[in-house]
Image: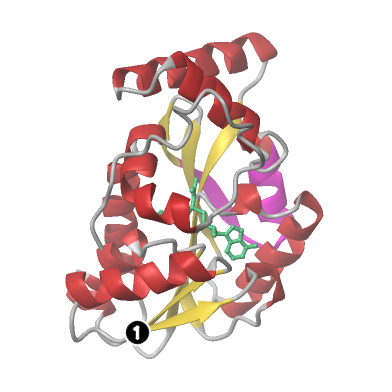
Amino acid sequence: MTASRDTLYANTLADPGLFTFDKAVVGVFPDMIQRSVPGYATVIAMTGLLAARHARPGTRIYDLGCSLGASTIAVAGHRETRNCEIVGIDKSEAMLAACRETLEGEIPGRRVTLVAGDVSELVYDNASVCILNYTLQFVAKEKRLPLLQALRQALEPGDILILSEKIELQPPGMDKLMIDMHHDFKRAQGYSDLEIARKRQALENVLVPETRDAHINRLHDAGFSHCDVWFQCYNFASLIAIA
Ligand code: GEK
């Protein structure tokens, strides 16, 4: 698949509508996520390393909301994960079709199970690593705890969950500063003020961020014994939770 530059929100005439992971987004996705999520490349590479450390042979590594398979590819690049089944899940058919093509090009010969479906409606079993890189933020709030409980049940003590999210900061003044800095980052990546504003509008009520404490408390409620932030760049954080 050839990656194109993201200019989806450059058009001033059309109503931006609600953001969805449709064919148009899929076509620009690698460029979009790279230029929109500060620290994305680091989180993906470290996800591979964290998975390599915790992968247990004969178990599954779940990549929930796998998009084009960036985390899956990072995980598959480590020999420690060789004897694990990697399962990529996404509810966007367009995304999954492009993911299949990307995996064939990037990790030919490595079998990955791709599942089209809603992460809240699937059954999880025999896992050693669960990855939620920038996906939980799109799941309805009331479905977040049951999903984390299901993932915790699929893991054994000592196994891990990696959770990367856009977060809300406290107090509100700090949140505003981080949002402004995120917008500075996007401007530096070549997005115009108009594109930034229109994308923000499209994501309103679609991407619902929560505070670091809300995530940590819920991970504990789901049965994880320890969790902490291992990476943060502005209002984008990645947490590790130990089962
Ligand atoms: C990466 N992890 O490159 N069930 C299944 N898939 C979902 C659901 C759901 N309920 N909700 C959203 N998705 C990737 C990036 S992108 C993040 C993840 C972003 C899927 C959605 O279709 C999309 O592919 C992905 O989750 C979120 O590290 O675009 O900001």
Q: Is residue 15 above or below residue 110?
A: above
Crowdedness near tag 1: few (<14), some (14–19) or many (≥20) residues, C-alpha within 10 Å: many
Counting from the top left corner in percent of width and height, residue 14 is at 59, 31
Q: In this view, does 31 lie above or below 156?
A: above
Q: Is 180 placed left or right of 171 in the picture?
A: left
Reply above or below: 117 against 211.
Answer: below
Tag 1 residue:
84
**Within the magenta stretch, is there residue 232?**
no
Q: How many marks?
A: 1
Nearer-the-camera pick, 137 or 161: 137
What residue appears at the point 70 percent right and 45 percent down from the top-left corner?
Answer: 217
Q: Where is residue 181 in the image (x, y as percent from the top left)?
A: 44, 15
Query: On the image, which quarter does residue 100 sit in?
Result: bottom left
Residue 94 percent coordinates (x, y): 48, 67
Secondary structure beneath disc 1? Answer: loop
Quadrant of image for the N terminus: bottom left
The part of the chain drawn in magenta is 214-229
Residue ID at (32%, 52%): 44
Question: Going 68% across and 14% down the picture, which residue do you hit?
Answer: 172
Camera sees residue 123: yes
Q: In this view, does 69 lie to the left or right of 172?
A: left
94 or 141, which is in the foreground? 94
Quadrant of the image containing the C terminus: bottom right
Residue sitting at the far bottom: 58
Is residue 78 among what the camera can see?
A: no
Instruction: Give the image location of residue 107, x and y in percent.
Output: 20, 75
Residue type, label 1: Cys
Q: Is residue 219 magenta?
A: yes
Apparent side of residue 180 relative to residue 74 in the rendered image (left or right): right
